[in-house]
Amino acid sequence: MTVTLAGPPLRAWQREAFDAWVAADRSAVVEAVTGTGKTTLGIAAAADAVARGMNVLVVVPGIELLDQWHRAIRRALPDTPIGRRGGGYADTFRGKRILVSTVQSAISRSAPRTLGPTLLVADEVHRYGALTFSRLLTESFSERIGLTATFERSDDGVERHLLPYFRTVINGCDYERGHADGILAPVRVMLVAVPFDEIEAAEYQEFDELARKLRGDLINKFGCADESFGEFMRDVQLLSGGESAEGSTWAARKYLYAFSKRRSLLAECRGKLEALRGLGAVLKETGQALTFSETKDSSRAAAEVLLEEGVLAAPFTSDLKRSDRARLLTEFKNGTITTLVAPKVLDEGVDVPEADVGIILASSKSRRQMIQRMGRVIRPKSDGRPASFLVMFAENTSEDPQNGAHGTFLEQLTGIASEVVTVAPEEAPALLREWMQVTSHTPGDLSPSSESSRPAESRVDSRAADDVVAIAHRLVEDDAPEEDFVTGSEHAEIGRVLRAVGESGTVDDFDTVLACLSILEPRQVSVLVMRYGLGGEQPKRQAEIGARLGVSSSQVSRIERTAIEYLGDTIAGELLSDVMVRMETV
């Protein structure tokens, strides 16, 4: 059987990686940076398998990727029967040669069994090193290809689960190769040093000193791992769930509280918002921008600041309705919205249109997160100019490069940059305006007066812009109606675990859950305890909880979602997943 891929031929690196995968007995992980075409490589492997009479299971971590892969495969293989599982779809291999499934559906008890030899295409494969998701890695798949931008985790999941299963790692396309092949744009980096105000500085110093002292105690007195940070946090989480009278338990809980407070101060630094406000006039005149924050609250605050400066900006968070998220991406692509502000929801699994500027309001120690964010911006520009990154950091804090902060994080960016400068907030707008001037490099490039370089508001229908601005204002005002945690959201499993433990958890299950909740703010803990019946009472609706706490139901919804998102982004998420696995096997 012959299967032909529609569309352009494979890029050189894709062909080389495909050949290396075949030489590795069709069992390997391919590592290639975001924006270089991992999906196309996965589809080529699927076409190869179908041509040899095999079935294909494509596994993805979320609903957005489920739809994206389904569309991409239909375009590339229009004559091949393809189905979906997850996100409301329940197709099986009956009558289908390729099935695209969320990982949650693929490991469920009702997951369809493969019929004969089957290829597993595991997108964002680093995700499946978690204990729960590693159940996907079974011997029923005779061939396997994993795809990722960064094959690493903060725990031992790569060594314990992924490498023994896939056996080989293929370096598909790094930044140097991407630049050489014309796949990625050159990069300029602006580090913006933002001061804390007097109150923020005092609070930060207090919690930073406490966190440092407790970290030393937890390592030296109570045996927590010194390296890596992920292993250290896992040990701290486990200690925090111990007997309350033990010194190690109190030390762990105090550390998690200080860590959380320090993180919040950095994420919500008022100086960063004012520095962003100063960039508003430039962003209003130039191309598309992606702004990366740490939390949904800070995303809304940043979008609100930009809207006040006349920038067509909107927050893009995991608690939006799927229809709102789809529309925002469409409007961003066509220029009606010029800036999206997002926490980690844009880091993986969302097909974001090309952007000219990346603004990082909250830095990260995660190499993987940095690579994901870079890939959103460093796609080649039609006019040939470099991509521009602005990294804001609070001076004299754990974010400050002068203190050795984020060495690995920044090296991913500065290592490929043609220019790296450090400036004060008041200097940033003029330099960004200079960087964003369009220059022609070849006769075929666009000129400064071309369509893509005009202000966005001159390129779109004014009524459409007004409509989208109204939507953006609604999103930053957070007036969503009461509802349960969104089933298809990135961290929906956390909500399911809490609900299951509230309904039928054992004493050990409750201990683990309460230990995980110890990293949250007290009001977040109160909301989750009442919402999911973790205090021995029946679960309560948001309106009832709001009445008890003296806040609106929409505020309760926001507190709940922020808390669950934070749990899902820390080692607590995996501990809670382990609880669900234990409950399912009892």
Image: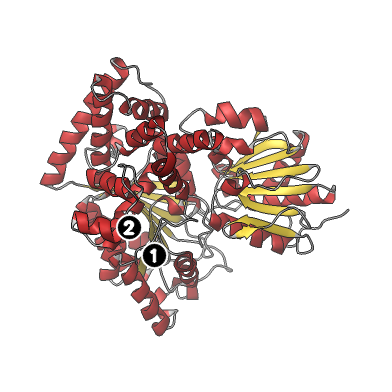
- Asked whether disc 1 touches disc 2, contact meaning CB atoms under 8 Å apart, the reply is no
Q: Is residue 336 visible?
A: yes
Q: Which residue is at a point 40% across and 84% down the rendered structure image?
A: 463
Up-down relation of residue 100 to residue 235 (above or below): below
Name the residue nearer the viewer: 456 or 262.
262
Q: Is mark 2 on a helix, strand or loop?
A: loop
Identify the residue under disc 2. Answer: 541
Q: Where is residue 261 in the image (x, y as percent from the top left)?
A: 23, 40
Q: Residues within 10 Å of mark 2 (few under 14, many from 20)?
A: some
Q: Position of residue 573 (x, y in %)?
A: 43, 39
Q: What is the distance, in whole Å, between disc 1 and disc 2 at their CAs?
A: 35 Å
Query: On residue 339, which mark appears?
Result: 1
Q: Residues within 10 Å of mark 1 (few under 14, many from 20)?
A: many
Give amino acid for label 2.
Arg
Nearest to viewer (mark 1 / mark 2): 2
Q: Position of residue 203 (x, y in %)?
A: 15, 40
Tell me if 329 is positioned left or right of 66 in this view: left
Residue 428 occupies quadrant:
bottom left
Name the residue nearer the viewer: 284 or 469.
469
Tell me if 357 is positioned left or right of 302 in this view: right
